[in-house]
Amino acid sequence: MDYKKILEDIHQEILPFADKGHQADYIPALAKVDPDQFGMCLMTVSGDTYAYMQADTRFSIQSITKVFALAMCLSLKGEDLWKRVGKEPSGTAFNSLIQLEIEKGIPRNPFINAGAIVLSDILISSLEDPEGEFLHFVRELCGDRTVDFNMEVALSERECGYLNAAIANLLKYHGTIENDIERVLMFYFKMCSVEMSCRELAKAFTAFTNFKPFDYAGFKLSQSRIKRMNAVMQTCGFYDEAGEFSYLVGLPGKSGVGGGIVAIYPMRYAVAVWSPRLNSKGNSVMGMKALELLTTATQESIF
Ligand code: GLN
């Protein structure tokens, strides 16, 4: 498959979408990012890499971080994790409160904010140095020790994070989180603030293609667990647009409001794409389109 040519063609085809959508501005530090950027990187399990445009520019991974947190929590807690958080698609926005109230503080899945706040609580309770171990894990996955939190972004989100604070309060009220709310929120915002490039994300996510046993920084997952993580990405990775992403792209994946999307073609490759302008559901406009064109051109999807 000539991925190099396919990526070049995709970029030409998505140019008409270049000014569609708006970058996230509810996190003030993200509003400063130049919205007119695009990068893409596809990495196969054998390490062949096809990088295009700004594939080496780091950006805020935001909710993509929830996949790393889920992997750590599943490794620590196994199936018991699902007593604290569900694995059903939410059909609601990533920061919705309504369902959480009705369902008495058990988040629908680990990829909406409520679910990831619970993951943050679990990591704080289970690890001596949650920040250090989280970074170590992500650095092992992508093979770069300079990957780090961006504290300006984390603090900027904390300053205006009224909805996430409301979610954390509701979780605490229902006894779903154990630790101090401020501590849990700050850890969650730090995880979201991690900056990585498309190349680093593609490398990190090849670990979730399931082509070899998962064992990074002491966090181990069986191939069966990785398979199930992919199932959760497929059904919940794009919030209330999970159906649309499944329909158009047909791969498990995860998006973030920094404009990044990572998708997995099981046993074969991981692909990361980034462009800051988002649609109304908080997913990158050009990113979604690029991945739709990729699986159309290659006929490589899970369906
Ligand atoms: N940090 C962001 C938030 O909590 C993550 C949201 C996202 O990327 N969808 O709102």
Image: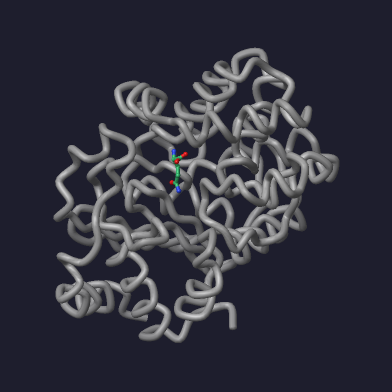
From the viewer's perspective, tell me whether residue 233 is left or right of residue 176: left
Where in the figure is residue 37, as x and y percent of width and height?
17, 54
> Image point 30% across, 66% down: which residue?
285
The quarter of the picture where residue 41 lies is bottom left
Q: Is residue 209 visible?
A: no
- Res 56 seen here: yes
Tally of numbered tags: 0
Q: How is the rendered protein coloured?
A: one colour
Q: Position of residue 120 (x, y in %)?
A: 62, 30
Which corner quadrant holds the C terminus?
Answer: bottom right
Q: Quadrant of residue 47?
A: bottom left
- Quadrant placement of the N terminus: bottom left
Residue drawn at x 76%, y 48% is 103
- 164 lies above or below 61: above
The residue at 36%/61% (across/down) is 280
Q: With 1 as the anchor, is 21 left or right in this view?
A: left
111, above or below 31, in the image = below
Image coordinates of residue 184 in percent, x first then y, are: 59, 22
Q: Nearer the viewer, residue 93 or 252?
A: 93
Q: Is residue 157 shown above or below 241?
A: above
Image x and y of residue 38, in percent: 21, 58
Q: Quadrant of ligand 1?
A: top left
Give the residue at x 80% y 46%.
82
Residue nearer the viewer, 100 or 244: 100
Query: Residue 134 vs residue 38: left or right?
Result: right
Q: Is residue 205 above or below residue 119?
A: below
